Structures are given as C-alpha cells and as structure tokens.
Amino acid sequence: MGAPTTLVAADARGVATITLNRPEIHNAFDDALIAELTATLERLDADRGVRVVVLTGAGKSFSAGADLNWMKRMALYSQAENRRDAEAMARLMRTLDMLGKPTVAQVQGAAIAGGCGLVACCDIALAAERATFAISETRLGLIPAVISPYVVAAIGERNARRYFLTAESFDARAAEQLGLVHGVFMADQLQAGVDRICDVLVANGPAAMRAAKDLIRLVARTPLDDALVAETARRIADIRAGAEGREGIASFLEKRRPNWTAGS
C-alpha cells in the first residue's frame, strides 16, 4: 500500500490537523483523496474529543486542484461516470462546509480550483504571504461548479464574475481583500497565527459554536420576517436553558473557567 493521502494529528487542546499528503503532485485531488478526506472529516466531526479541525497541505502547495492522471481518466468517462465523480467531490465540499466543529484552513502555498473550494468551505482561512489562488476551471474549458456555492459565498457575486471568468491567479493579499482569507502571515509566522486562533476557539463552548454555525446558515439564507425573528428567539432560549449555556453563565459570574476548557 502507498502512503495515506491524508495525515491526521491531534494535540492536547483537541485541535486535529488534517494534512493533505501528496506533496509530489502539489496535493492534487483524485478520487482516492476525495474519499479519504471525506471519511476523515466525518470521523473527526463525530469525535467528541476534537474541538477544532485544521486543514493544511504537505510541501509547497495547499492543493493544486485536480490530479492530471485523474483528469485523463475522467476524459474517458461516460456522462453517468462523470456525474458520480462530481457528486463525490460535491459531498466532500458539503461535508467540510457543514462540519459541526470550527474549521481553519492553513494555506501555506498555492490553492487552485478545488483547493480554493476547500479554503472557502472552512470557517476561518489564514494564508502565508507567498500563497497564491486561482479559480482556474474555465482555462480548461470547464466550470467551478461544485465549489461555486462556497466560493461565491466567500467572495461575493461581483468578484466571482471576474475570477470565475478570467481564471487569473491572485496573491494572498488580494485573497484577503476579497474575503477568501481572514489573515495573511509571513511563512514562518503562519503556524503561530493558526495556533492563536485555535486557542481562541477551544476557549468557547463547543455546542454553542456548532449552534452558531447553524445559525449563520439560517440567517444568511432566510428573509428577515416574523418567522425568522421567532426562530432566533427560540434558539437563544434553548441555549440559555441548556447545560452548556448554564455552565457558561455560571462560570462567568463565578469568575472561573468553564468546564469545557482544558485543565479546568
């Protein structure tokens, strides 16, 4: 058997780091990596000991999109085979986007096509200054279909009109201006930046963060009407009455650490 296409390491804080492990081909996607990464994300989401999931890549690139050998195989696929292949990729993106745990993209190098999709699916994205980005599918006569809901949500329709159509590359500072990444660091400071944001995340209530992610999905896609107002009131009432909400308020009033923090 060859080396695993993803590596997973967890630390004492409950931060699990997934490393795409195909550095010799810039962590490009194929069907095996897609299946393995999807299964890994599902396993970590179900693991109560995991508080935060970090996604990064081995070597120079975060992910360079589709593997050339995989693309050659796809060129010979029937329409039905292409549909199954695309659905597997779509499932990966949705799994990452819907993960109940906070997710952080640690973008140490190039994120191209599907690699950009992974970045957009993460809750927080931090990039090295040397990282580059491109939504490059139209250059190959394709479209960025399965990543489009997440990339458009990140950069907006107007910016998508430019970068989907031109397929041009852009640097980390431009990615930050577009909203694709939240912070840019010198290469030797990126890990420290990721560690700092993970420290912030593990201090928060895990159930509350899961509920907050679900709340964002609701309000971002729902008109502001009486039903939405009532639903938001119901959600905060449920959280306040729940065990984690009661513990959070009690720990604040008693000037102590809540019971979900390490070493409390």
Image (spheres, rainbow, N blue to C red):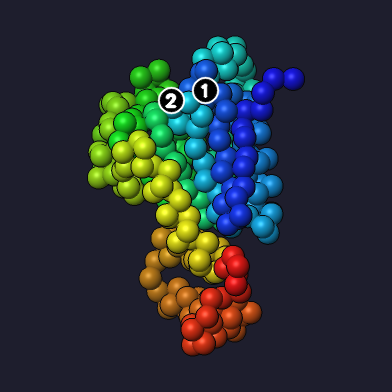
Quarter the C terminus occupies:
bottom right
Instruction: Identify the residue at image location x=55%, y=32%.
Output: 20
User: What count of labels does the image hold?
Assistant: 2
Question: Going by the picture, which residue comes out furthest to the front?
Answer: 263
Residue placed under numbered mark 2 in the picture: 60
Instruction: Identify the residue at image location x=69%, y=54%.
Output: 46
Residue 195 x %, y %: 45, 51
Pointer 2 with pointer 1, Cβ within 8 A: yes
Instruction: Identify the residue at image location x=67%, y=23%.
Output: 3
Question: Going by the picture, which residue comes out furthest to the bottom?
Answer: 253
132 w.r.t. 9: above or below: above
Residue 114 x %, y %: 47, 31
Is residue 174 toward the left or the right of residue 40 in the image?
left
Residue 200 x %, y %: 45, 61
Is residue 34 toward the left or the right of residue 173 in the image?
right
In the image shown, does 190 or 79 lie closer to the viewer? Answer: 190
Residue 50 x %, y %: 63, 55
Name which residue type carries label 2.
Lys
Cα distance between the residues tagged 2 and 1: 7 Å
Residue placed under numbered mark 1 in the picture: 23
Q: Residues within 10 Å of mark 2 (few under 14, many from 20)?
A: some
In the image shown, does 153 or 192 lie closer to the viewer? Answer: 192
In the image shown, does 101 or 109 lie closer to the viewer? Answer: 109
Q: Residues within 10 Å of mark 1 (few under 14, many from 20)?
A: some
Quarter the N terminus occupies:
top right
